[in-house]
Amino acid sequence: MGFLKDMRAFKQLADSTPRQGLRATLRDGLATASSAAEQAQRAQHLALHGLPGHATITTLRDTGTSINDNPLVELGLEVTLDGRAPYAVTHQQVISRLAVGGFQPGATVPVRVDPADPASVMVA
């Protein structure tokens, strides 16, 4: 009987303990979802209105964040648009785990650039 009494006391203690970890997890999850929605909206805008160009990847860094098991990476890019001098941009984007191998320093990738903000790019 002592064992069941101890288990009941342990359950009551667990039930009465505030769950800050759960709140933080939910808050972080909502922030990530909001960020993903903003990125999707920006990507749609750039797909429709962005200037086509290409970029050479100069650096690649994993941010430690994953969305749907795909890493959010930070890319250092040397962007080239027709009729403009190349310029450097740091850009974060979710990359499919299957495609990460093609995103190594030295690789050239197609990009879309916001005409109003040349620092706003999307790897197409």
Image (cartoon, grey):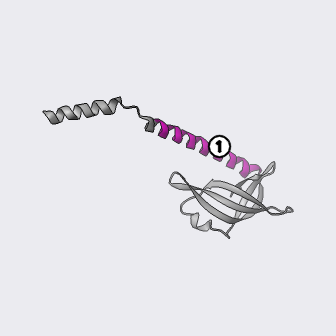
Query: Magenta stretch containing residue 37, yes or no?
Result: yes
Q: Quadrant of residue 105?
A: bottom right
Q: Residue at x 76, y 60 (%)?
A: 88
* Quadrant containing the C terminus in the rendered view: bottom right
Given the current orientation, which residue lies at the most extreme bottom position? 106
**Nearer to us in this view, 115 or 57:** 57
Residue 117 relative to residue 64: left or right? right
Instruction: Name which residue type carries label 1.
Output: Glu
Residue 9 relative to residue 122: left or right? left
Q: Residue at x 51, y 51 (%)?
A: 68
Q: Quadrant of residue 59?
A: bottom right
Residue 29 relative to residue 42: left or right? left
* Quadrant containing the N terminus in the rendered view: top left
Q: Residue 87, how many percent across, how many down?
A: 79, 61
Which stretch is magenta? Answer: 23-49
Q: Residue 97, how many percent across, how many down?
A: 54, 61
Q: Residue at x 54, y 39 (%)?
A: 30
Q: Residue 91, how many percent across, how many down?
A: 68, 55
Given the current orientation, which residue lies at the most extreme right position? 83
Mark 1 Cα within 10 Å, few/some/many (few <14, many 20+)?
few
Q: Residue at x 22, y 35 (%)?
A: 7
**Nearer to us in this view, 42 or 106:** 106
Dominant secondary structure, magenta:
helix
Q: Residue 25, how many percent across, how many down?
A: 48, 40
Query: Magenta stretch containing residue 122, yes or no?
Result: no
Please state the total of marks drawn on the protein image. Answer: 1
Q: Which residue is mark 1?
A: 38
Residue 34 relative to residue 8: left or right? right
Element under disc 1 = helix
The relative height of residue 122 versus residue 86 in the rendered view (above or below) is: above
